[in-house]
Image (cartoon, rainbow, N blue to C red):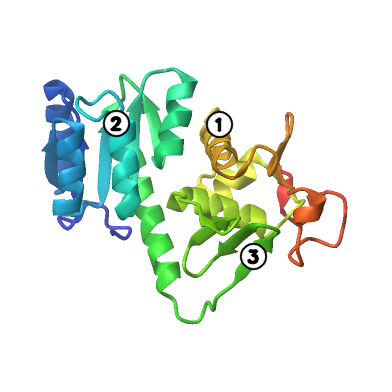
Amino acid sequence: MCSENTGSDQITLLIASADPSFAGSASRHAAAQNWTVKIAPDGVSAVRDAKKHSPNLIIMDIAIPGTGGLKATRKICQSDIIPIIMLTSRDENDKIAGFTAGAEDCMSKPVSMRELFMRCKVLLRRFDRIKTKAEKKDEGNEILRFGSLVIDTLSHTVSMNGEPVHLTPTEFSLLTVFAKNPKTLFTRTKLLEEVWNWTNAKGTRTTDSHVKALRAKLGSKIIKTEHGVGYVFAPEAEEISENECENDGFDSNKIGLD
């Protein structure tokens, strides 16, 4: 993982794309950052190279030949924790499928190289912070239980009905923010600050896409939408454990509103 020095030559980027024009342009931008670049022209190669080279970051084209980007992403995420930026069409369903498969971020093609590599740097910084937190010995273990949903904040694991649920690090961070503040109304702006450390991201649908991915994995009712405002983590009443806020109403003074 990298720290704030995202220009370090210790960074390895895997570009999974069969488009030579895109791969060449992305390689040149990565080289300008002194990053090491590996190129995989198909899904099978992407899975193999992710295991072989242990890259710090992967740019994955959803339309990559072979297994396809979605299947390649799922395979990589089954055994490795590597941030993946998925390049998709402009169809929202493609983006949701990308997030559900395990991508940390999705961008519509054609992409701006400047924006793409800014997102790469943001992901690297975010993962570095997650790694640093996980390595702190004084954090202690905290288990959050909501009926059949169990969240271990130290080991970064989630289970439901006794079965493990695979979440990306960003999905886990988002779920943890919600779970530590059940029934608190969060605006999209506040969630972007808490999880992504973005202070100015007008117009982005990043929060909405990650919430949809969480709902797909944990159930559609676990996060409720307050239309025009934001989201509330509100498992059904019988599912709430001792972690539940004592107030039955939304605690809008606690964290949520702008």
From this viewpoint, which residue is outermost toward the right? 248
Residue marked by disc 2:
69
Query: Looking at the image, is mark 1 or mark 3 earlier in the sequence?
Result: 3
Secondary element at tag 1: loop
Q: Amino acid at mark 2?
A: Gly
Q: Position of residue 58 (x, y in %)?
A: 26, 42
Query: Looking at the image, is mark 2 or mark 1 earlier in the sequence?
Result: 2
Q: Amino acid at mark 3?
A: Leu
Label placed on residue 144? 3
Secondary element at tag 3: strand
Q: Are marks 1 and 3 in contact (CB under 8 Å)?
A: no
Looking at this view, is 51 or 115 the one in front? 51
Q: Which circle, 2 or 1, is nearer the viewer?
A: 2
**Residue 22 in the figure: left or right of residue 226:** left
Looking at this view, is 61 or 258 the one in front? 61
**Residue 200 in the figure: left or right of residue 253:** left
Residue marked by disc 1:
202
